Amino acid sequence: MDIIHHGAVSGVTGSCHELRVNDAGILIDCGLFQGTDARDELAIDFAIDHIKALVVTHVHIDHVGRLPYLLGAGFEGPIYCSQPSALLLPAMLEDALKIGFTRNKKLIDRVLKVLEQRLRPLPYGQWQQIKGCDVRIRLQRAGHILGSAYVECEAAGERVVFSGDLGAPHSPLLVAPVPPERCDVLVLESTYGDKNHESREHRRLRLKAAVEHALEDGGTLLIPAFSLGRTQDLLYELESLIAEFGTEQAAPDLPWSELEVVVDSLLAANFTQLYRKLKPFWNEEAQARLSEGRHPLSFEQLTVINSHGDHLNAVGYLARSHKPCVVLAGSGMCSGGRVVNYLKALLNDARNDVLFVGYQAEGTPGRDILEYGPDGGWVELDGERFDICAQVHQISGYSAHAGQDDLIAFATGIHPPPRQIRLIHGEAEAKAVLRARLGELLPGTEVVVPGP
């Protein structure tokens, strides 16, 4: 048995890992490289003739973005994923193909048809034998986004667990991950291996404070949000704040009832609709809200912008108006999409705020705004410099990734401990810090950082 890493070893993108047993193997994810990891050549640069199946942990682009190229390279095996992921994956890949591959609808439809034929949705907790390979797999909830899973693999008498991306406990809508009952080798993500997130209550209060700044001076709170996961989490929390403070008695000095929440992303709007279809997979708290007659992802003060014309009108209106507004727009790292037009129009006005709620990869405009914005710096967008006068904030608690303590709790919650932990999907410092902590807590476990 061997574990081979085809991505996410020198950074946090391009997740793709191979479990090989004798002369056959399976792939865990096939993601796109982004930020400073980005590559001009997207072709599959490893042998696939022996690959019998692809297992998708979740549908974020850094875990599935190279799937069309895998199909183009001749992969003909099944694609296993959770039942919610099977609903979400076609929408994610259709968008990725339009942006990075082709606008040819016939070609996109052909790829999606092949995908539909290959998809094999699996219930959580059910073992599946891989045909042609001495491996069986089982998906367990990872708590990262709806449908996310970590993958248990039994092969050659050992159990190997690929974490995918783990989520933090107490996330809106999601059931928290539980460590596996047994694991010999753990392949563990380390995105936030060197830091912890704020508690849910603390991050909710900070989100409330950012919204209140918009309410006080009629500014716009711009949130560059990833279309899948983060947008839905934020809508859930914003609905909660409006429900709590939307009466004159609760907040007599602030017009919460006048706050408009705008989702300006076709993909985010699509995913939000799909999230609504996946209500049976929501956690108990979200189910309770539904039973009260509330609609966490579809409330009165929510507006969805679809057409490009409406988008441009909204940008111009918010730049001129003094109406308080929260705008969620992609892309999450400000490297493209509609959020760029909002940034160009709003960054130079101190009334406005930019709130980052997710990881900003090195080399992206989001990372530059986060690093230089608080000091009144500038950012380059589409080849032009824009001064940053708006306030810049970050709330790490809304990251869909587990923090350091969450990762450690997952690893140390396995009894007996794994004989080996392989740290992937993290920057060098994060992996080094997490490796040292795990080495202290699990002295009998070999903790390694695979090389590229």
Image (spheres, rainbow, N blue to C red):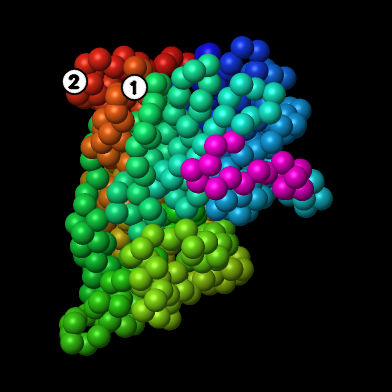
Quarter of the figure with residue 311: bottom right
Q: Residue 25, percent across and down?
A: 62, 21
Q: Residue 119, percent across and down?
A: 67, 44
Q: Residue 254, percent across and down?
A: 22, 80
Q: Which amino acid does label 2 sit on?
A: Glu
Q: Residue at x 49, y 64 (%)?
A: 279
Does residue 234 lie above or below 123 as drawn? below
Q: Which residue is drawn at 21% across and 52% down?
A: 199
From the image, tell me which residue sits under label 2: 440
From the image, tell me which residue sits under label 1: 418
* Residue closer to the observer: 103 or 373: 103
- Residue extending farthest to the bottom is 248
Q: Which residue is drawn at 42% across and 16% down?
A: 450
Residue 63 can be seen in this image: no
Using a 10 Å C-alpha cutoff, classify the residue at mark 2 as few (fewer than 14 neighbours), some (14 to 19) or many (20 or more): few
* Residue closer to the observer: 343 or 278: 278
Q: Is residue 184 magenta?
A: no
Q: Residue 95, percent across and down?
A: 63, 51
* Residue closer to the observer: 323 or 427: 427
* Magenta-tinted stretch: 112-128
Local secondary structure at mark 2: helix
Q: Is residue 118 magenta?
A: yes
Does residue 143 lie above or below 438 as drawn? below
Q: Which amino acid does label 1 sit on?
A: Pro
